[in-house]
Image: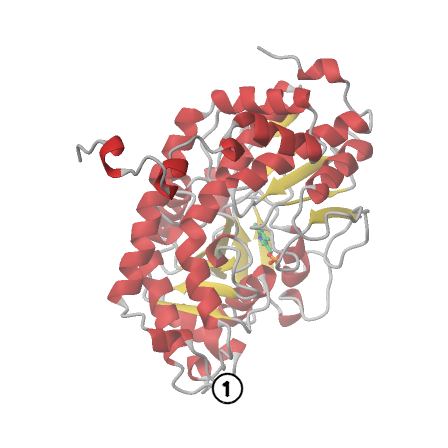
Amino acid sequence: MDMNIKDIRKPDGPQAHTLKPNPASSPAETEGLYTSLAISPQVLAYGEQIIEGLKDRFGQIERTAEYNQLKVIKAMQESKVSEACLLGTTGYGYNDLGRDTLEEVYAKIFHTEDALVRPQITCGTHALALALMSNLRPGDELLSPVGKPYDTLEEVIGIRPSRGSLAEYGITYRQIDLLPDGCFDYENIRKALNGKTRIVTIQRSKGYQTRPTLSVEKIGELISFIKEIKPDVICMVDNCYGEFVEIMEPSDVGADMVVGSLIKNPGGGLAPTGGYIAGRKDCIENAACRLTSPGLAKEVGASLGILSSFYQGLFLAPTVTAGALKGAIFAANCYEKLGFCVIPNGKEERHDIIQAVTLGSPEGVIAFCKGIQAAAPVDSFVTPEPWDMPGYDSQVIMAAGAFVSGSSIELSADGPIKPPYAVYFQGGLTWFHAKFGIMKSIQQLLDDHVISSDRLKIV
Ligand SMILES: *Cc1c(COP(=O)(O)O)cnc(C)c1O
């Protein structure tokens, strides 16, 4: 539109003022706010310099987010999400339109036959335990071809003896570690697959390990290999932290079940609890029978008033995940140039939102977490301390000032207090919060004398 602004404004009218530059948007004002939030000019300059080098990467992330945003909208439209879907049921929850429609939306997004998306699934571990326990029978074997699973699954499986574990039900477990270079040990995976193998569990994200996260493409290669040897085996992917990072999901490359938590990526920061399993109809039916009861399956489970947050969170999830990804890449580049080992490194492709930084000392891990905590919108004034967290075999320190307790799609950091003293950083509902948090962590390392300020000199 070719319109001359001078023609449409009155010289002394209120419109004249709106054309003046807004002083609050100038960098000096922003810098002033950073200073008042205790980010030193040196740390800010360091951060800005890192961001200068990341413009192309950020553009790529935006394009993935755009695709996934459209994928979510399309699924919602095709499933005819209506205002009535946002309401909930009470009691038994029969004929819960919103719940059933949301499960259809998830199935469309993941391109699966069915899905179970429930507030009664309490967390990611519960969703994974549910998927496993409902689809395994006594005498069956579970195989992990990608090494040790996430810490909390050790008790689910019975790797560490635990009440109610799969081991107590006569379900055995086998594990093939990744090769030292991070590749699959195809030869030993072939040998491990046997007549008893019923489920193969593949963890996409690295969790509390320093191995690389698996790309969807790599997961697809592994599943093809396994299915060629044993076509009837169920391939389950622990999808925690991976949703919407790529344009494909593991269910697009042959996974029979994908499993995750709603207080990570797919809840978009708004879901206050919950978990999901998307997959083959018979697998989901088994999971539903276990979650509720044989005979009742998916038909019960009141959604109360929670559904609008599930829908709206899912709608926001692609952009929220993109913000978290930018934060992870920013953190990797900041810490790499400070001389720390970071996984993934500053240049690598991303397959989840987690950033591991090996700080090498308990003091480093604690300072990092203090910095993240001090950047939070909620509980910024508290100091995180290591504690004995249920389900973990060493002390863990966690920084989280979240709107949803324990939510790790919100800016958070945690790390077990054991060598190599790595901290796992993730989330950020907005990129600007992630940026602020990471600069705050660097500031804390300086203030606590874990690093000296001459480390900040780059170019
Ligand atoms: C977070 C996570 C889990 C467990 O989820 P919770 O919600 O903490 O129980 C399992 N696997 C991976 C890879 C995770 O990141």
Report the label total. Answer: 1
Look at the image and tell me in which quarter the C terminus lies: top right
Q: Position of residue 49 (x, y in %)?
A: 55, 19
Task: In the rendered view, tell whether residue 424 sits above or below residue 450.
Answer: below
Asked whether, in this view, residue 282 is left or right of residue 321, the answer is left
Outermost residue to the front = 12
Q: Nearer the viewer, residue 254 or 213?
A: 213
**What amino acid type is highlighted by mark number 1?**
Thr
- Asked whether the viewer can see residue 181, the reply is yes
Outermost residue to the top = 459
Task: In the rendered view, tell whether residue 76 sits above or below residue 63.
Answer: below
The residue shown at (34%, 69%) is 104
Judging by the rendered image, the residue that carries numbered circle 1 is 90
Outermost residue to the left = 2
Q: Position of residue 103 (x, y in %)?
A: 38, 69
Asked whether, in this view, residue 230 is left or right of residue 399, the answer is left
Q: Nearer the viewer, residue 167 or 371?
A: 371
Q: Is mark 1 within 8 Å of ligand 1?
A: no
Look at the image and tell me in which quarter the N terminus lies: top left
